[in-house]
Amino acid sequence: MVQSLSWFFLLLAGFAEAQTGTVPLPAVTADKIVPPWADAVGGEKPRESARQFRFAAGSNALKIPIVEDNGHIFVQGTVDGFGPVWMTLDTGAGGAIVDKALVKNFGIKPTGTLQAEGAGGVETEETATNVSFGLPGLSLHRQSTGVLPLDFISRRTGRSVAALLGYEFFANFVVEIDFAGERMNLYDPRTFHYSGRGEIVPLEFHDNLPCIDASLKMPDGEVATGKFVVDLGSDISVIVPQNYAAKHNLLKSLHPTMEVTARGVGGGEVRTVNARIAGIQIQQTFVAGPIAAFPQNSQGFVAGENSVGNMGGSLLRHFHVIFDYSRQQMILEQGADFAEPFDADASGLRVIASGPKLETVSIAAVVAGSPAVEAGLQIGDQLMALDGRPVPEIRMLKKIFRQDGRELELTVKRAGTVEVRKLRLRKDFMSCLPPLSQAECLCAEKRAVPLPALESVYSWLTSSQFRYITIQGSRSMEEGRGGPR
């Protein structure tokens, strides 16, 4: 079975319960996928992937432009020769996905089905074979894919996403991602040789999901050590499910906190407690002050006696990362943004794009007690201008909304009437997320808490995922640090 938490938690983080009422969420119809093209193998090694790629020249493709959005990776390419189109990358997805709405444009004919199971029942979705993907400098052939709607990703990010590349993509190449420089290098694993000074982190695979050993350090100094899924598609730094957090009473030192509520499969609500923890230890590297999510109700997506959680792209983006599945390792170098704090929103707004070209940006949620409420902004307001200028893309808008103390002039359209609202950004309403210095994080006394064995870690993953499997250093890539021998 192949699953990913990725886009469910993007949904969860992005749509809060509004002061003006419960936010209507995009329809989600499945939370577990069982693709027939990817057999679950578990165990110590990733499934071998047939070499079905061709480089345009040599044994690598270098300096591929990417767009980084809070740890999510977007890249332009082609699907069956059609393009350019946007694609996303995700280490937490076990197979490729092509957007259901675009298969006719691509000339793809579904050849099979997959079973998507959710709290509301079982749904059958289509699959396709012999699909080709192209990226700058290389092509992938004879790929098997799921055919699923990806419009949720497109609307949430304001970027029309046509396809998703998961496990098979990462298994075929050594993938080097420069988050800060927004570039990617791909190498043939047979000729790749690493000569840098990064930290080599062993990967262990379960159901083709990459896992690492790491430790969470809580504000009171308690340390939880175990295995975590590496999930580029999640924009939350760390997710620790209810059963494990409750068993070890990890929430006792999280104060203050903020609850976020989203609607789950079958109409039920999913509630998390979000808070800043002291840090995460990966091998010899300590990352201070990430924001973690602790799901509070198990129905729909958290199940099983023993769970550890996952680490998302918003944490990985602080590094320059090399994924080398062939050698079962991930290499971490401190990126240009390593010291950048894990920032929180200062507006209380969540926006979504719509329209044929995703040109319309509207308010999808308003967080209670936030500056957005004080400014009189409401769900459904269409953003017409920002400080008298055209509304920027959603990625840039989210960055602007994190600028504490800044005053913005938002021109909005509501029920046919254009209004101007003053929005003064402030982070104190997100009091659960005060910044922590590296020194404060390191001064607490350590108390070890053992985590469960790997075999029982994934009980919640394999019973709870939503069908929106996702996308998902310092030295310059021109130096060819990870180049061929």
Image (spheres, rainbow, N blue to C red):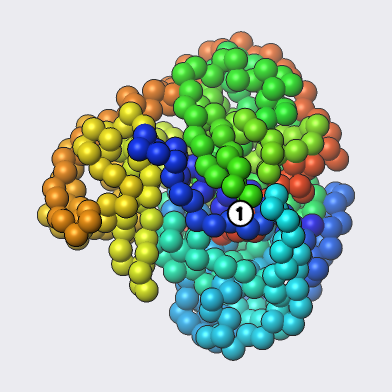
The structure residue drawn at horizontal position 58% and vertical position 56%, both measured from the top left corner, is: 28
For badge 1, the amino acid type reads: Ile
| Residue 130, horizontal then vertical, whole percent | 71, 83
Q: According to the image, label 1 marks what residue? A: 322
147, 144: nearer the viewer: 147
67 up-or-down from 126: above or below = above
| Residue 451, horizontal then vertical, whole percent | 77, 28
66, 451: nearer the viewer: 451
101, 93: nearer the viewer: 101
The reply to whether residue 439 is in sight is no
Side of 109 where 366 appears, left or right: left
| Residue 394, horizontal then vertical, whole percent | 35, 55
The structure residue drawn at horizontal position 25% and vertical position 43%, both measured from the top left corner, is: 377
| Residue 424, horizontal then vertical, whole percent | 20, 35
Q: Quadrant of residue 239?
A: top right
Report how many numbered discs are placed on residues in the image: 1
The reply to whether residue 220 is in sight is yes
Side of 253 where 393 appears, left or right: left
Q: Quadrant of residue 304?
A: top right
| Residue that extends furthest to the top in the rendered view of this protein | 445
346 up-or-down from 328: above or below = above
The structure residue drawn at horizontal position 50% and vertical position 56%, both measured from the top left corner, is: 26
SS for dot 1: strand
394, 142: nearer the viewer: 394
Side of 325 where 236 appears, left or right: left
